Image (cartoon, rainbow, N blue to C red):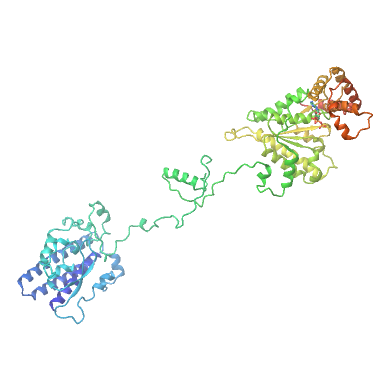
Amino acid sequence: MNSNSDIGDIVNLIKVCREKALLGLYRDSVRKFEIALKTIRHHWNTLSDEYTINRWKSTEKSIKEEMEQVKLLQSSVEEMGGNSAPSLKKHRSEKDERPINSSSSKRQQPLLKKGGSQRKNFDVDVRVPGQNSKKERIDNPADLSRFGGLQPFEHHAIPQEYIKYDERGNIINPTDVVNQDYQKPPSNYQNRSDPYSGFGAPDYSGRGGRQPYQQQMPQQPYYKDPDVWDPPSPPARQNKPKSRQPAVKRKVRPTRPTGSGSRPATSGSRPAASSAKGNSSKADGKRDYDKPWLPPPKKEKKKADTFLEHVYPDGEGPDADLIKMLERDVVSKNPNVHFDDIAELDDAKRVLQEAVVLPLLMPDYFRGIRRPWKGVCLFGPPGTGKTMLAKAVATMGKTTFFNVSASSLASKWRGETEKLVRILFEMARFYAPSTVFIDEVDSVASKRGGGDHESSKKMKTEFFIQMDGVSSEAASEPTEETKDDPIKNVMVLAATNRPWDLDEAMIRRLEKRIYIPLPEEEGRKVLFEINLKNTQLDNDIDWDALVEKTKGYSGADINNLCREAALMPMRRKILGKRMDMQEIADMKSEFEVPLCMEDFVDALKNVKTSVGTQFLKEYKDWMAEFGSV
Ligand SMILES: Nc1ncnc2c1ncn2[C@@H]1O[C@H](COP(=O)(O)OP(=O)(O)OP(=O)(O)O)[C@@H](O)[C@H]1O
């Protein structure tokens, strides 16, 4: 073997030794070290130059010490009962001694070029800290130390400044370089007496084997060897996906404004609200991210202005026509009738105020045993002010007034009255507080008999159900949860001229039954005043006589009498004259004269009482039997 091939083999062997050691194959590494040492010895035995021999001997000594260190590591591992690099051994046969790293394998190819001369050139990988790996051409075998395979510990631990070159570019004293490096142990070299101390350094022990111990060591500079695999990752965390955030940034859903409890809006919202939420969640130390498994936050529903909008936001639906009819014909937001506009009837006013108005004004007081009456029935002769009383109640209680009559529940809606009643009460609850006034209640809730139409029976039943429903909420005693809830107060007022025709189920639900009689003397006087308050009157009118003459007249009758009297001046002026309509209109100013007694006397001839005296006894009898004031 010539000198160059000797050196090439030695370099190659030392590289393999170190790679084995770095892979934890300490036993194999030691075996290769022994072969390398034999080769070195054999090499310098062939030399004659004393100086070169000494330098080889020095190198041999360094390599031997390096081998001893590997042996020490091997024995330490074996003492702990472990195998060096068991995982590698498991999968690799003993025969396959090549390092795993492919680049290292490449370097195991014979460095001697084919057909090379006696003085062969060969490439070695020379690495210096802070510099990338590079191939260098070595011409002089004496430049052994530059091969990066013969320095103790780590060849790349040799600081560049230690290497000296002559004018031809050769290292002047390679052995000195090796010795200097050896005398000055690398910074990662620990106390050798402690077998563990050497493990912590990025040398043969590998960086994966002593992690916990290493963490206690002071931080040392580490130069990653590109030919060495990284140690196995610690369990669990490193294999986790870096982030669970989706690749595409999700739209953030707006959330509800805070205070309602929102879910956020969400989501969704959640740009504006979501950022608020995000901030708050960050303040809580919680991550803010979409939770698609949770139901989306409820959007705060805008309260509809009308019941139709409430039921059908787009205005169309199967019952839209019914609802529209009720809104148009039945609902009166402001009836604008006051108790002062109603003559007499003080008892009825007092009872109604207590039974209807106060529960609307103090719903929390009228709960439980003090619950409002399910319904109030006003009965009496026609035209006595029952409707006026109901409207005055609605005005005073600031409730929505539902003026329901038999006519609005019948006609073309026949067959759908049951549904109509249900919608009516739903609407009343929507507009609550509400007053549902059922005029002529006898015609919608007359005594049930065998001759009743099926739809009529259903409608009555629906009325009873709904009337029970409106009172049940207030009837329940308030609980901790419901005590602050506003009661959707719906009061049912009914009026009839024929209370004796009422179905008993309806009578029972109309718990207050108030008789609205014909006006008394004082009442008639007030009725004249109310009806004529904006009319010019002559001083000759004998009011007492008029009150006397209108005995048995209802409020509606007196109203008619006053209107008739107010037209008398015009009639008198045109009486017996042949005039067309325009001529009469042109005389308008002549008609505006104060009313006199004569006008009322003439009017009395035209306006008679509308109430038969025979019914008055029946009202009194029914009042005596069913009345409740
Ligand atoms: N007590 C009253 N005070 C003032 N006006 C009255 C009174 N009673 C009746 N009137 C007059 O009679 C008219 C009819 O009254 P209202 O409609 O309230 O009677 P009603 O009892 O409901 O009649 P019906 O039973 O026929 O429905 C009123 O417009 C009003 O002018």
Percent of width and height locating residue 611? 87, 28
Percent of width and height locating residue 555? 82, 26
- Which image quarter holds the N terminus? bottom left
- In the rendered view, would you say 268 is above or below 333? below
- What is the quadrant of residue 400 in the picture? top right
Towards the viewer: 542 or 610: 542
| Residue lying farthest to the bottom in this orientation | 115
- In the rendered view, would you say 115 is above or below 357? below
Residue 621 in view of the camera: no
- In the rendered view, would you say 470 is above or below 598? below
- What is the quadrant of residue 202 in the picture? bottom left
Question: What residue sits 16% from the left and 57% below the top?
Answer: 192
Question: What residue sits 25% from the left and 54% below the top?
Answer: 214
Percent of width and height locating residue 613? 89, 26
Q: In the rendered view, does 347 fall on the left or right side of 211?
A: right
Towards the viewer: 264 or 562: 562
- What is the quadrant of residue 99 in the picture? bottom left
Q: In the rendered view, does 601 fall on the left or right side of 204?
A: right
The quadrant where ligand 1 appears is top right
Residue 519 in view of the camera: yes
**Number of marks in picture:** 0
Question: What residue sits 78% from the left and 29% below the top?
Answer: 386
Towards the viewer: 42 or 560: 560
- Which image quarter holds the C terminus? top right
Question: What residue sits 59% from the left and 44% below the top?
Answer: 301
Percent of width and height locating residue 346? 76, 22
